[in-house]
Image (cartoon, rainbow, N blue to C red):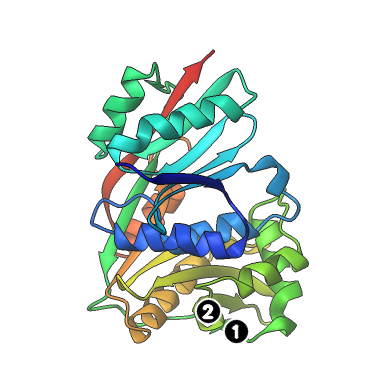
């Protein structure tokens, strides 16, 4: 394809272009979701210098993008015939001795390109399952006595919302300022930021659901429970509530990624109990130089 322009990421407007490419190419085996991109880009403050990002455009339309996490991680969306150019750029700007990128096991064309370039599947045994379910025939939400499930009301909830995330994912770089950035990002909706409130008023579990209004698929990213309130079924409550709210917002399907290996089986078991079924799995390809 001629007249392809390659240019660096220039801010939130370019994130929308990256999201639009994800939306237009969406299908049953799609790897990226618009919500995941927003969460990953804005959850941590001050990371932009570590994240070289490039867009490829043809006649004003984004046809590929690549996002590097220095020293050697790559996330990208590109047609198979542009993958070599993406990898050429990646190899030029990375500083690490070990390069890595993750795709789905159904992306056979990209797997062939990576193998030809000397990448090999990692042998550490960890992987994620792409799990999904339709939003018809949802069970009712049952909340333990004394607890309440609701959605984030606004800025007044940010301190508690950040506190429960930082407990669930300790140690965490998420701050109140960075979470406010997340809340300003498209397609965040506070009515899909679902939380469980303890009897003492603390937020103790959550499920952040991201809508894709074009494809009517919502993604959970992230889901967590305060360390002091685990094994009470509260994450399940938050996720089920989020599915009801996604359906009310027009979504037909919910999507989540969960560890599929034996090292951390709990989340996948939770989602299976909610009716999610596993499809593709991730494969991380590495390259040493």
Q: Which mark is residue 270?
A: none
Q: In the rendered view, does 212 fall on the left or right side of 226?
A: left
Taking the image as drawn, is residue 114 in sight? yes
Residues at badges 2 and 1 in contact (C-beta under 8 Å)? no
**Which secondary structure lies at badge 1?**
loop
Residue 48 rendering spot, x and y as whole percentages: 69, 49
Q: Residue furthest top?
A: 289
**Which secondary structure lies at badge 2?**
loop
In the image shown, does 283 or 33 lie closer to the viewer? 33
Residue 85 rendering spot, x and y as whole percentages: 41, 32
Quarter of the figure that contains the N terminus: top left
| Quarter residue 39 falls in | bottom right
**Circle 1 residue:** 146
Rendered view: 188 above or below 4: below
Q: Which mark is residue 189?
A: 2
Question: In front of the other: label 2 or label 1?
Answer: 2
- Residue under the point 30% across and 52% down: 30
Q: In the rendered view, does 157 fall on the left or right side of 210?
A: right
- Residue under the point 72% across and 63% down: 178
In the image shown, does 27 or 144 lie closer to the viewer? 27
Task: Give the distance between the C-alpha atoms of the residues marked 2 and 1, in whole angstroms.
Answer: 26 Å
- Residue under the point 50% across and 66% down: 235
- Residue under the point 64% across and 57% down: 168
Residue 35 rendering spot, x and y as whole percentages: 47, 64
């Amino acid at each position: 394809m001629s007249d392809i322009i390659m240019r660096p990421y220039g801010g939130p407007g370019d994130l929308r272009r990256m999201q639009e490419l994800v939306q237009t190419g969406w299908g049953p085996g799609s790897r990226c979701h618009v919500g995941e991109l927003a969460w990953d880009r804005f959850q941590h403050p001050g990371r932009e210098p570590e994240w070289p990002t490039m867009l490829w455009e043809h006649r004003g339309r984004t046809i590929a993008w690549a996002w590097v996490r220095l020293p050697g991680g790559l996330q990208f969306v590109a047609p198979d015939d542009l993958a070599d150019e993406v990898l050429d750029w990646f190899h030029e700007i990375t500083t690490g001795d070990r390069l890595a990128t993750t795709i789905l096991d159904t992306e056979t064309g990209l797997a062939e390109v990576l193998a030809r370039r000397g990448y090999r599947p990692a042998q550490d045994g960890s992987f994620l399952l792409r799990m999904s379910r339709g939003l018809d025939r949802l069970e009712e939400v049952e909340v333990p006595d004394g607890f309440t499930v609701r959605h984030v009301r606004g800025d007044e909830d940010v301190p508690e919302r950040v506190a429960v995330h930082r407990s669930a994912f300790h140690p965490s770089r998420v701050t109140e300022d960075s979470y406010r950035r997340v809340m300003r990002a498209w397609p965040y909706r506070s009515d899909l930021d679902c939380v469980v409130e303890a009897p003492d008023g603390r937020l103790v579990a959550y499920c952040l659901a991201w809508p894709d209004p074009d494809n009517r698929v919502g993604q959970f990213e992230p889901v967590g429970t305060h360390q002091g309130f685990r094994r009470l079924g509260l994450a399940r409550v938050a996720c089920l509530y989020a599915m009801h709210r996604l359906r009310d917002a027009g979504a037909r399907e919910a999507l989540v990624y969960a560890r599929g290996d034996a090292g951390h089986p709990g989340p996948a078991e939770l989602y299976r109990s909610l009716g999610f079924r596993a499809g593709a799995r991730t494969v991380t390809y590495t390259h040493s130089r």
